[in-house]
Amino acid sequence: MMLRALAKRLNCTVTRAEGNSLVHAGRSLSTAAPSSLSKSSPLSQHGGVHGTRTTQKTWRNKPLFRREGDVRFRTGTEAAEMLINEVKRRDSHEKDFVQVFENALQTLAPVFERIPKYAFVAKEFLEPERIFQFRVSWLDDSGSYRMNRGFRVQYSSALGPFEGGLHFHKDVNAGMVKSMAFARVFTNALTGCEMGAAVGGADFNPMNKSEAEIQRFCQAYMTELSKYIGPDQDLPGVGTGVGAREIGYLYGQYKRMSIHHAQKGKGLLWGGVYPFPQATASGVVHWAARVLEGKGDSLEGKRCLITGSGKMALHVAEKLVEMGAVPLTLSDTSGHVYEPDGIDAAKLKTIMKIKSERGARIGRYIIASTTAKYNEPENVFSVPADLVFPCATHNEIDGVTATMLADMGVQGVFEGSHMPCTNQAISIFKKRGILHGGHVATLAADSIFNGLELSKSSPSMHDLDGRIKEAVDSIYLEAKATAKEFNVRGDMHAGAIMAGFLRVADTIICHGAV
């Protein structure tokens, strides 16, 4: 009795172990499913994610915003809408950021409903910790002066040093980088690697540049970026247009300027040697396999539609072949190729060789194949398939395409790039019962690989693949348990966002207003 009286004074919740459950606030939260979760997960702690009625009432009575008077919310949905409207007011010009923020906050509405204090924590995500935008000046092969914009958005360091990719593409802008950094917060939190989140890049297109021009640009970009990164501060990684070649040039310039030697397997840009470019794609396919396994199914024999033909798309196809699935398509800006009987290992090797040549288009493949179809059917998404892996551009699957895929009987869509599906498409997936693997969860292997403390002896891809599979299994169980806890059972996209948010939010609460 004295213990309960003390707990009441301290506004704490008393829990007791009872069998295989934690009895908390008048209800039982089973620990069977979350037993695989890390101790930092709110679902694995005493009391789970529930708060007492007293604390809920206290937080709900506080104003979420104080502009134009004290503004309070009554429901979790109201809190989410208030936060979304604030982002639209501040950053309406950043369409990509508004889109990904809106999707995440709508997903988190049940969390705000049950634990109102988390709506106040979510205010921290309205702004990144810091944003760097800088000029990148370099000389092309003709000796002409060229200039690009460089970016690095360091969104959150709540869990550890910033970590995230770099993207060199002509369409890179501040809003796009900011949206990717925001999503990276949840992805990195899911991995358990104790890393914050950041993303950077530049509006530079390496596809039409010579080797010397790429080197000069990377050196100019790193000259400025080196002021803001470091082994215990910010760990940049690979991304669109930034592969093994760019990583080498970037690290070489960083080492020249800072006298730094990266740790083997962990540190800055892998010490200039990027050994496993297929690691991220491996995570995408393992996530699809785990979700299907949860439904009593497998990848074996599944006909898979893949968009894109960059490194991610090609390695996704490679992993699908390895796991017994049947890739059907690959594409680029010129069109798509379709193999009715599937792309096997030999055909994929031919495509990889073609795409390894600078500026080569996917259409060249039809010269090497007697069965391939080029731009037939006209819309790549009208190819009959069981699963879809969008690995090309953002928003390539909109509401109309999502409806078409559902009508064709597609079982699942698993994202292999940042934000390839619009919010309307995601909503249709939920309504039509299509399995959806959002990029927050599917791209976790990139963070795992960059943040992994590998042994001094170089691991094999087989060893790394096993670690990625193990991590994907853990993330899947946590996302599944979280979705069940907040009454969105089976929605793995929502479960992943919620689980990642809760991990970061609890740490932010400990840090206070920083």
Image: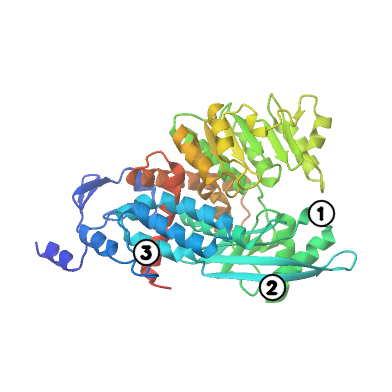
Given residues 15 and 370, the one toward you in this image is 370
The answer to whether residue 104 is above or below residue 5 is above
Mark 2 lies on a secondary structure that is helix
Amino acid type at circle 1 is: Asn
The answer to whether residue 16 is above or below residue 58 is above
Amino acid type at circle 3 is: Phe
The residue that disc 1 covers is 208
What residue lies at 70% left-to-right and 66% top-to-bottom? Answer: 149
Residue 260: x %, y % from top left? 66, 72
Mark 1 lies on a secondary structure that is helix
Dot 1: few (<14), some (14–19), or many (≥20) neighbours within 10 Å?
few
Residue 52: x %, y % from top left? 22, 58
Dot 3: few (<14), some (14–19), or many (≥20) neighbours within 10 Å?
many
The residue that disc 2 covers is 224
Q: Earlier in the sequence, mark 3 or mark 1?
A: 3
- Residue 120 marker: 3
- The CA span between labels 2 and 1 is 23 Å
Residue 478: x %, y % from top left? 40, 47
The answer to whether residue 246 is above or below residue 302 is below
